Image (cartoon, grey):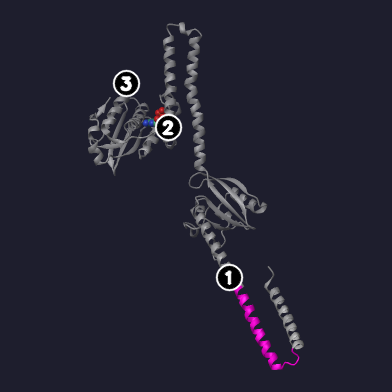
């Protein structure tokens, strides 16, 4: 667009030329016209021309103003949207200028870099206050990887990716993407990949453990099968023992595979729960009887302390599975002459069920991981004890599918306590389902 001064100059020159031509024509065409008449006509022509020109200029001016207003509205709306997007982003966003000073950041950034108190806790992205001193990136984070990524993006005008590990309150890992913005800015987005990496580690460990768990019984099965084929089949004294071993390890593999398919069915939501009113004391007694039958040789004593009237809303088969896994572990990982206590109470519409034992306990470092698939706390001891390492993972998913929660507390060498919650059946359900409730009295103690 031509500069305004140049336009005004052109219009003035054109006006002088038109006026000169007009005066010349008037003098040639009307040589006898009196001076007064000539002036009157000139004033009228000049007035009319000024009026028409002003109207034309004002119209264009109004149109231009209108366009500017619309563009301003659009820019404001775009800014509002962008700020709202930045504010709601879970990823930390930081924009720096060429002097590596933070010119804008969203609130999530305060969880990644150190920001002064007056710049935290706002839902909106923050632009620095001109009155306060500039916030340098190096003061917000000492991490050399972050500073280097922003410097390189500004200097080389290319997008940079970096991995950032923060260990302030808890260890967290971020993927940082920095890109040049405009002429002298750079924007960095921090993606929290802590959880992703944890899941990836769990997945890797799961497959490593799984192949180990499958290979162990398989190797034993192959060894015994080969021994039998090599002639032991005719060894009347030992063949029955070999076949027993084959059967034991094949059973273990079978249990492992059925637990895995059960777990994946529960995890993928294929298992449909059919909740109904169940008297807790009765189902716990049945579970204890089952566990007792399985561990006939164990001298661990089992005690139940559950209010007779406590009725939960749960899927019977799945609740049996939860209880059996927890009681079975409490017996398996116990010591000679130890005890297992199953107790329950009702709080705020939930039944809180606790299975505590006086067994070997679980180390603090292992506690958060015992609900992971195939995780075994005390590797040397756990391997000797029968089990697939999937029981607690199944328990966790089943409890959650019932809308409850499961937790564990333990002291190594003292014992463990697993606690889970279930919804209590409503009064109406309890009355309506009374005939369905099993009327099995809970023994106070079983050996
Ligand atoms: P497993 O088939 O090995 O019992 P689980 O998933 O049921 O598998 O348990 C995972 C691990 O948690 C066990 O291998 C054991 O190390 C630990 N664990 C579970 N329950 C107890 C308990 N009551 N006392 C001590 N350790 C336990």
The percent coordinates of residue 89 (x first, y second) are 50, 52
Kindly report the distance in space between the C-alpha atoms of the residues bearing marks 1 and 3: 93 Å
Residue topped by disc 3 = 296
Foreground: disc 1 or disc 2: 1
* Ligand 1 neighbours mark 1 (CB distance < 8 Å): no
Q: Are marks 1 and 2 in contact (CB under 8 Å)?
A: no
Circle 2: element type: helix
Circle 1: element type: helix
Position of the N terminus, as image quadrant, is bottom right
The percent coordinates of residue 389 (x first, y second) are 43, 29
Chain-order first, disc 2 or disc 3: 2
Viewer-proximal residue, 65 or 242?
Answer: 65
Circle 3: element type: loop
The numbered mark at residue 65 is 1
Which residue does the image show at 66% across and 52% down from the upper left? 157
Chain-order first, disc 1 or disc 3: 1
Query: Within the image, what quadrant is residue 429 found in?
Result: top left
Q: Is residue 335 above or below residue 135?
A: above
Residue topped by disc 2 = 265
Kindly report the distance in space between the C-alpha atoms of the residues bearing marks 1 and 2: 65 Å
Q: Is residue 44 magenta?
A: yes
The percent coordinates of residue 2 (x first, y second) are 69, 69
Point out the stretch of residues depicted in magenta: 30-59
Position of the C terminus, as image quadrant, is top left
Query: Within the image, what quadrant is residue 369 found in?
Result: top left
């Amino acid at each position: 667009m031509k500069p305004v001064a140049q336009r005004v100059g052109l219009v003035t020159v054109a006006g002088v030329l038109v006026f000169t031509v007009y005066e010349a024509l008037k003098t040639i065409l009307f040589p006898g016209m009196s001076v007064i008449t000539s002036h009157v006509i000139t004033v009228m022509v000049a007035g009319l021309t000024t009026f028409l020109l002003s109207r034309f200029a004002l119209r264009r001016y109004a149109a231009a103003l209108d366009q500017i207003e619309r563009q301003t509205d659009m820019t404001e709306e775009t800014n509002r949207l962008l700020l709202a997007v930045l504010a709601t982003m879970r990823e930390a966003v930081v924009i720096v200028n060429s002097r590596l000073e933070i010119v804008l950041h969203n609130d999530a950034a305060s969880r990644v870099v150190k920001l002064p108190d007056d710049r935290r806790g706002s839902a909106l992205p923050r632009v620095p206050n001109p009155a306060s001193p500039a916030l340098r990136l190096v003061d917000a984070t000492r991490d050399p990887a972050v500073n280097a990524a922003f410097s390189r993006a500004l200097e080389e005008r290319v997008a940079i990716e970096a991995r950032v590990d923060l260990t302030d309150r808890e260890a967290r890992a971020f993927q940082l993407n920095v890109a040049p913005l405009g002429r002298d800015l750079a924007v960095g987005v921090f993606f929290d990949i802590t959880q992703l990496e944890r899941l990836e580690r769990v997945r890797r460990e799961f497959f490593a453990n799984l192949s180990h768990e499958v290979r162990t019984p398989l190797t034993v099965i192959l060894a015994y099968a080969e021994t039998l084929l090599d002639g032991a089949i005719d060894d009347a004294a030992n063949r029955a023992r070999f076949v027993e071993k084959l059967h034991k390890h094949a059973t273990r593999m079978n249990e492992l595979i059925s637990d895995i398919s059960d777990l994946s069915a529960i995890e993928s939501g294929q298992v449909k729960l059919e909740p109904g009113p169940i008297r807790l004391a009765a189902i716990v007694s049945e579970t204890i009887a089952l566990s007792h039958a399985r561990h006939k040789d164990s001298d661990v004593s089992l005690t139940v302390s559950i209010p007779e009237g406590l009725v939960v809303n749960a899927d019977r088969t799945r609740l049996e599975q939860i209880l059996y896994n927890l009681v079975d572990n409490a017996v398996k990982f116990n010591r000679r002459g130890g005890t297992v206590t199953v107790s329950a109470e009702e709080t705020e519409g939930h039944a809180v069920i606790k299975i505590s034992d006086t067994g070997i306990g679980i180390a603090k470092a292992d506690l958060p991981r015992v609900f992971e698939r195939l995780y075994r706390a005390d590797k040397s001891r756990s391997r000797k004890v029968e089990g697939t390492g999937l029981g607690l993972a199944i328990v966790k998913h089943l409890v959650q599918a019932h809308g409850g929660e499961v937790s564990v507390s333990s002291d190594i060498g003292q014992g463990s306590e697993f606690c889970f919650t279930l919804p209590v059946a409503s009064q109406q359900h309890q009355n309506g389902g009374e005939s369905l409730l099993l009327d099995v009295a809970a023994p106070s103690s079983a050996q």
